[in-house]
Amino acid sequence: MMQNWRIPAALAGLLLACVALVGQAQAQAQAQAQTQAQPQAQPQAEGSLWENPHHRYVRQYEGTRTCLQCHEAQARQVFSSVHYQWRAPAPDILNARDRQIGKINISNDFCTSPVVSWIGILQNTSGQVIGNGCSKCHAGLGLQPDEQLSQAQLENIDCLICHAPGYRREVIRREDNSFRWVPDARGNPELMLNVVQHVGRPTNEMCLRCHLGAGGGMNYKRGDLETALAHPTRDFDVHMGSGMQCIQCHQFRAHRVRGGGTQMSGPDLPDEQRLRCEGCHKGALHSQAVVNRHMSAVACTTCHIPLFARKDPTDMHRDWSQAMAVPGEDRYEPLIRFASRVQPVYAWWNGKGTIAMLDDPVRRTAEGKVSFYQPAGRRGDPAARIHAFKYHTARLPVDKATGLLIPVQVGPVFRSGDIAAGVKGGAAAYSGRDLDPARDVGWIESERFLGIFHGVQPKEAALGCGDCHAPGGRMDWQALGYGGDPRG
């Protein structure tokens, strides 16, 4: 594993750069070729103008109101989904205590809480835009999601972010000083109409717009969602490199999506949160019986994803107690340690886990860390198998008096490197607490296990017996509950 300390690339425009990886013409040509190759497997392509029925119905685009004329029922489904609400009942989070859980009401170990840095136009001292807030990846147009359905909330849904190839958007300040996401093409009615008339089911381009840049940059957060997935080879990912689309595994039912892995959130479809390879790959899959026997205790991805961050470095540690200037960009960011070609860590996981809650006092592990996702499961648990994880650590602020995590308001940090102002502003914005950063704020070390599920390599690259069972192999057998190598 190669590691280096450096400052990440600019947050502003990162996701737009992701979108630029896949041009509209390329996306249409690729989708058409894939559909011809696998007609039963592929989602609906955007198609050309004469293939898409929207060109007959949409003559003028007036925002989401235009979509609601025909699709209000679908908009109501989106309103209730995790992609919009950013929270849901969380039966697989063991300390949820019947609360709806999601990124809207928890703090994470990357950008902390979105609610204190939701939307705006953050400029550096040169007047350049360096950020627009966490709503950049919300399926809305600027309002925070409300649990109460209303016309304003329906019209806040951004249908195009998930359904329009080549779509771009930016933040503007309106006359009432509120902020709103608007299409880049709004000043060109002909181009705007072309975008709207070519909507279709989500393709990989649409999904990667947000999920690729989670945590502030390309592959920062997950480690297994890299820019190479925009145009992957089969050697990089056997599924997406063979033409598969995200929504073939992450299928939608009434705008609710399957899957979720080790997310710090309740799922859209609780009974289908855990996607398993065996859903498609059935029976005795290996020629050797001993390898087939491993499948009862070892997840497929454990052997078939030997490394992650193979192209794009991933964030392995983020320290919010320090800010560093980004050379040549007139802005700052927290100190981040990146790594490439990372070997996963391994742990038992039964699909459940515990997380750190923003409104609960922190609880430290025996090693003194606060766990933001701790996978549940152990040897002998019939529901658990050994899974591959990215192990992320961070340094985060906490209220000394209450033991509560403090979300960081990222604007002061990005603009001037003022950690104290970011912590003070975050405490005030979230809970109204007026804290003295020098007196009232402490710092905790955190850990988090993030499941590795993407980047499955061809079988020739899978782990062999010696990778785990030879002296110095990658498995920590004692940590997994064995006295030593179970093979003897």
Image (cartoon, rainbow, N blue to C red):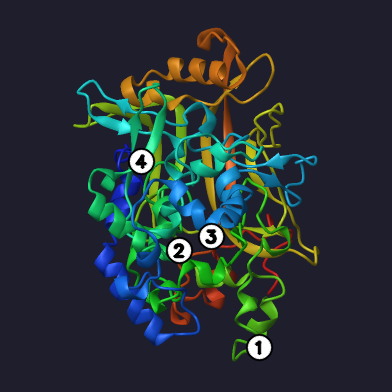
Q: Quadrant of residue 341?
A: bottom left
Q: Is residue 328 above or below residue 227?
A: above
Q: Which label number is shown at residue 202? A: 2
The mark that comes first in sequence, 1 or 4, is 4
Residue neighbourhood size for the residue with mark 2, other residues' Cα within 10 Å, grouped as few (<14), some (14–19), many (≥20):
many
Q: Which amino acid does label 3 sit on?
A: Ile
Disc 2, SS: loop
Estimate the x, y position of residue 243 in percent, counting from the top left.
40, 77
Spatial distance from mark 1 to mark 2, Cα to Cα?
Answer: 33 Å
Look at the image and tell me in which quarter the C terminus lies: bottom right
Q: Check the image and report above or below for 346 versus 392.
A: below
The amino acid pointed to by label 2 is Pro
Q: Which mark, by number, is residue 284? A: 1
* Disc 2/disc 4 C-alpha distance (Å): 20 Å
Residue position marked by numbered label 3 in the rendering: 452
Mark 3: secondary structure: loop
Quadrant assignment for the N terminus: bottom left
The residue where tag 4 is placed is 182
- Cα gap from disc 4 to disc 3, whole angstroms: 34 Å
Q: What residue type is labelled 1?
A: Ala
Of the two numbered discs 1 and 3 on the same chain, state the one appearing first in sequence: 1
Kind of element beneath mark 1: loop
Q: Nearer the viewer, residue 90 or 330?
A: 90
Q: Earlier in the sequence, mark 2 or mark 4?
A: 4
Mark 4 closeness class: few <14, some 14–19, many ≥20 residues within 10 Å: some
Q: Which of marks 3 and 2 is nearer the N terminus?
A: 2
Q: How far apart are marks 3 and 2 (CA)?
A: 23 Å
